[in-house]
Structure formats: structure tokens, C-alpha cells
Image (cartoon, rainbow, N blue to C red):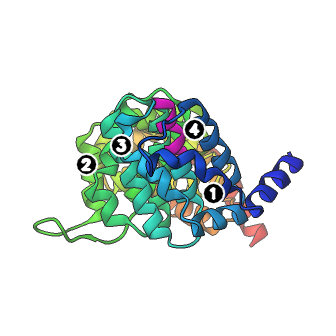
Amino acid sequence: MAADDKKQRDMGQLNIFHALEEFFLPLKNEKVRWEFEVLVRVLKLIDRIVHQAQNLSVYVEAKGITDIVAICRNPANYSEEVINEAATVITSVATKVKMNQQAYGKLGVQILLMLFKHNPTNEDLHELISQMIFSAAQNGLNNEMLIREGCEKILLKFLRESKVEHVLKFSCMGLAEISSMEGTLSYLDPPSEIKPYVIKTVMQSRVIPVLISLLQLGWPEVNSSVARILAAVADLGEVGLNEIVKNGGIVPLVKLLGDKDREVKEQALYTFGKILFGAGQYADAYIQYFFEERGEVPLLECILSKEVEVQVPALSILNNLTFQSENIEILRESGIEEKNEKIRKTS
């Protein structure tokens, strides 16, 4: 593997990109015919080479992406395999480049969405689109553009319809990033904050049952992302909380309290804090559901955490639970006094 990496790096340093320009001559001379099979191999080679940071810089400086973009802008003129490989190169460049990230992120998203309109059933393209949206959302440089282009709706569509693992993972991660965005959508009348606008779209799409079902798959990146999305939904108040609970959200959220990842536990605790004490008339029923699923067991483990982001909200939830006398006996049976003693000894 190291030898392959070195060869690819050396190929970039030898400026192989200029040598490959002849394969794109049909873009400049209509008399030269395309050889799609050869073009596919060339595009695959370029994608492998640009994975090296030094090679990517050479490629970007040489404006090699211009030819790839030209191919993607006319998808009807090429085979699906050519378009898939060209889209892969664009995604690799746009998600890995360190200079002009905003411009390349915008270019990558817009080119891939254009290809999606041309061929909406292409699953290879779905993976690239979800990956590209996640990357652009993660760097936070094109927030308003992503919403204007309807990227959150595309990810929701993938979550409802796709069975492809990588598409589901990238869609969850991308939606989690978009659900956490700050900023204002100034193009709306009246303008709207991004986060509540996106969460309302999530609610209207009826994707909450899908998100909750994905927690059963045990994918760490999905657990983390769904926990973040549900925490954002919980911020809507009773409407969002009821949507989570009625779709069976308590059971998987209890399991997330025992997750190895700090952020997953933190988000699950945040959501439970809302469910148990912010659901108005439903709060007592939700607390009962929580105890029926033995939610106090992983909750008590959380108060022993050395991470304050986990321990503090766990202690807050326990404190609120003890306001009701019937809860105290359940907590005693589950070992709250022993856990408190451990905290005292270590503090």
C-alpha cells in the first residue's frame, strides 16, 4: 500500500496531469472522438492520484478540474460510467481541497445536484451527493446555499428510500450537520433562522421513524448523527418530543445512554432531559416509560463519568427525578446510593 501511495505521489509530481490532457481533446476538437472505456480508466487514475495532498494541489493549480466539470455539464453526451467517475473526481477534489473550500464546496454540490436531476435513480451518484453535502455542511462555509438548493430535502429523501449503507450514513451525518447550523436564511420572506427551518422540514417529512429504526443497526456514525438530530427535534417542544416518543424513541435512546461515544451520550441525555421534563401534560407518562425500559440503569452509570459533558446533565436529570417520591424507591433499587458514594469518594 505504501509503495502504491509513493507511486501515485511521484506520478503527480512528474506532472502526469499534463500528459493526460490529450484524453480530453474531444472537448476542444469535435473531430476527435471519445473513447469512453479509455476515459473511464483515465478518470479513475486521476481520482487515485488526487488523494495525495501534494498531487491534489498540483491538480487544482493546473485547473484540471475544468475538463471534468465540462463533462459533467453535458451528461447526456457520455456513458453513465463516465459520469460516475467524473462525479467521483469532483467529489474527491471538493471534499479534500484546503484552498478556496467555499468555492469548491459550492461547485461540487451544484454539479452533483445537476447530475441528480439528470439521473435521479443512480445509486452511485446518491452516495457521492450525500458525501458532498455532508462535507459542505461540515465546513460551514455554504450554509445558506445548501438550504436554498434543497439539500436537506434530498438527504431526507435518501433516508426514506435508500437501502445503501454509505448513502444512509452520509445522509445521517449531513442532516445532523445541517440540523445544527447557525445563521439566517435571508432569501426567505420573512427571513428565518436555519435550525428551526430545517427541523420543521424534518418533522414534515415524517422521517423520525426511519431515524429511530436506524439506531438498531449499531453504526457508530449513525448513532451520533441521529442523537444530534433528535436533540434538535426535542428543541421544538411538545410537538417534537411527542414525535420522538410515539415512534418508539425511548428504547433506542436508553441504549444510547450506554454508548461508548461521549457525544452520543451527551445528546441522548439532552434529549431525555427534554422528554422527561419538557413534555408538559405527557411528562409523567414519559417518565413511566423511561423507568419501564430501565433507563435509570445507564443513567446512573453516566453520573460516574469522568466527562463533565456527560456527568452534569445526568446528575441534573436524576435530581429532577427525585422530586417525585415514587421515583426515589426505583432509583434506590437500582443503586443510586452506591453510585453517590462512589462520586463522594472520588471527588
From the viewer's perspective, is residue 40 above or below residue 229? above
In screen coordinates, is 286 left or right of 48? left
Task: Give the CA separation, mark 1 to mark 3.
Answer: 46 Å
Disc on the earlier residue, 2 or 4: 4
Look at the numbered disc 3 and give the secondary structure of its residue: loop
Task: Give the CA separation, mark 2 to mark 1.
Answer: 28 Å
Look at the numbered disc 2 and give the secondary structure of its residue: helix
Kindly identify the residue that appears in the image at 36 percent across and 32 percent down. Answer: 160
- Give the quadrant of residue 122: top left
In screen coordinates, is 94 left or right of 113? right
Assign the magenta stretch its main secondary structure: helix
Q: Which residues are magenta?
A: 80-88
Looking at the image, the residue that sits furthest to the front is 31
Q: Which residue is mark 1?
A: 262
Label 4 is placed on what type of residue? Leu
Q: Is residue 300 visible?
A: no
From the viewer's perspective, is residue 145 above or below residue 45? below
**Contact between labelled residues 3 and 1, with CB atoms less than 8 Å apart:** no
Q: Residues within 10 Å of mark 2 (few under 14, many from 20)?
A: some
Task: Give the CA separation, mark 3 to mark 2.
Answer: 32 Å
* Badge number at residue 74: 3
* Badge number at residue 39: 4
Quadrant in which the N terminus appears: top right
Disc on the earlier residue, 3 or 2: 3
